Structure formats: C-alpha cells, structure tokens
Amino acid sequence: MIPLPRGFWVIWSTFFLAMVLMLIPLPEWARIYQPQWAALVLIYWCLALPERVGVGTAWVLGLMLDVLTGTLLGQHALGLSIVAYLTLKMYQRLRVFPMWQQALSIMVLVAMQQMVSLWVLGIIDTPPDTWTYWISSITSLLLWPWVYLFLRNIRRAFQIL
C-alpha cells in the first residue's frame, strides 16, 4: 500500500469544508453573494503546493461538487479544472503579487469558472436571468485575503510542505 503524502487529510478536509460552505442554505436575497468557496480553496492549494494539487484534484473536487449540488455532471469539474490549470501556469507570478493584485487575479479566475458554468447552462437552455450571476466573483475577491490567511495558518500549523 502506498503511503499518503503528509497533510493529505488536511488538504481534503479544507476541500470538504469548502463544499459544506457552498451547500449552506441561504436566504433568497443572499444567494447571489455566496462566494465560490471550492474555487478559492483550490486556488490556494494550487498556489501553495503546485506539485501536489493540480488539475486531477480539481476534476475530482468538481465532480464531487456536481454530485452534491445536483448540477449537470462535469459542470463544476470542467470549470475547476480550467481554473487549476491556469493557476498552475501562473503560480510563480501570483505568489509574488501584493494581496490586492492577487485578489484581482483570483476574481478573474473565479469569473472564468463562472463563465464555463454559464456556457454549460446555456447549452442546456437554463441560463441565469440577470447580471447578478457575476456578483459571487466580487464576493470571492473580497474574501480572498481572509481565505488565504486562514489556509496559510492551517498549512503552517500542520507543517504541510
């Protein structure tokens, strides 16, 4: 049996927490503000540990999210895989950006994931009605510094290298 890398369960626990946060029922008026928790956590781990978290992890996470939310199978998987790929291509640049510039880049990545979901929704003829679909990208931008600090503290506390 192949031993699991150090911190495997910690990383997947943070993904599980992100999925739980995405499943929390919110009032109708607050649903548009719900950030893309899974994408934020995935981006963090791709930045912090690019050799351990990648496109395959994003695909599995996306499929799990598709099953949990009842969306078309592969909708989140495709979007998160593209986000992971782009993050891995740019991770050396993103790491050295100041926090405000990093947050703007994260907003663009999250918007790209939403664009893929919008494309899939358009194919199955159920697009969103209004421009408020994009507000969660802005909410993700605003929450990125706290998500980053929270996950960095977890990574340091469990000494995940």
Image (spheres, grey):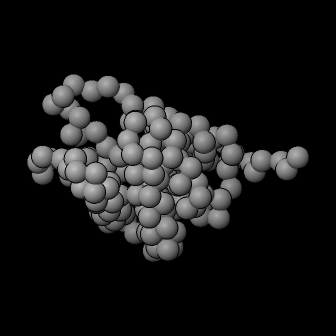
Q: Residue furthest front?
A: 124
Which residue is nearer to you in this view: 53 or 61? 61
Whether residue 114 is visible, yes or no, is: no
Residue at 46%, 34% in the rendered image? 68
Q: How many marks?
A: 0
Q: Position of residue 33 (x, y in %)?
A: 23, 40
Whether residue 144 is visible, yes or no, is: yes
Question: In which quadrant is the C terminus drawn?
Answer: bottom right
Residue 87 left/right relative to 105:
right
Residue at 40%, 69% in the rendered image? 97
Q: Position of residue 26 (x, y in %)?
A: 27, 27
Residue at 20%, 32% in the rendered image? 30
Which residue is nearer to you in this view: 117 or 14? 117
Residue 4 left/right relative to 130:
right
Q: Residue furthest left?
A: 130
Residue at 48%, 49% in the rendered image? 62
Residue 105 left/right relative to 153:
left
Q: Residue furthest right?
A: 1
Q: Quadrant of residue 13?
A: top right
Q: Position of residue 3 (x, y in %)?
A: 83, 48
